[in-house]
Image (tube, helix red, strand yellow):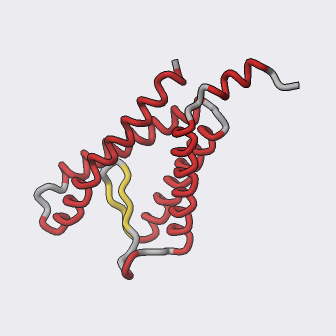
Amino acid sequence: MADPLMAVAAARWPRDLQIFASICVVWSVVLIARALFNLSAGGVPIEDVIFGVKFHGDEARVTMALQAVVIAAFGIGILVHRSWGLIVALLYMAQVVIGHVIFITSNLGVESQRIHVRIASAEAPVVLLIALYVVWRARPLLS
């Protein structure tokens, strides 16, 4: 017989958060495929950024695989209604936001990084909105 307390706890997790977690798991599969099979756009070597530090080649493949594992972990954690999944998601999103700020500010005057700074600047509002969404949805579930 199912425990009624577990049913109440499971019911309070919003559907849109479950959809977000599912998208995260799918995205982690895409990232791990890129890292394992060295898939890059237009023959350009793979690049990856963590905490504002840009990695190239094999180092980028390793960091991308690590990010894929973290994204899959918090996606699965949220799907199975575990609070640690939300905590890992919050920490990861904080890393992404901080990494964008560090990357943009440290490469602002570097001519060779101009296009990458422009891309990161265009991504920044979307990244911030996703981070705020995770915070907004996580608050009632973690309190």
Judge left or right: residue 37 versus residue 79: left
Foreground of the two, 28 or 35: 28
* Image position of 59 with respect to 138: above or below: below
Judge left or right: residue 101 versus residue 38: left
Foreground of the two, 137 or 124: 137
Residue at image position (37%, 81%) is: 42
Residue at image position (83%, 25%) is: 2
Judge left or right: residue 122 versus residue 108: right
Q: Position of residue 97 (x, y in %)?
A: 32, 43
Residue at image position (50%, 69%) is: 34
Query: Exactly how many numbered labels are in the figure?
Result: 0
Toward the right, the furthest residue is: 1
Residue 115: quarter of image: bottom left
Residue 36: quarter of image: bottom right
* Image position of 139 with respect to 67: above or below: above
The quadrant of the image that shows the N terminus is top right
Q: Position of residue 27 (x, y in %)?
A: 52, 57
Residue at image position (68%, 21%) is: 8
Toward the bottom, the furthest residue is: 43
Q: Position of residue 101 (x, y in %)?
A: 25, 45
Q: Position of residue 113 (x, y in %)?
A: 19, 64
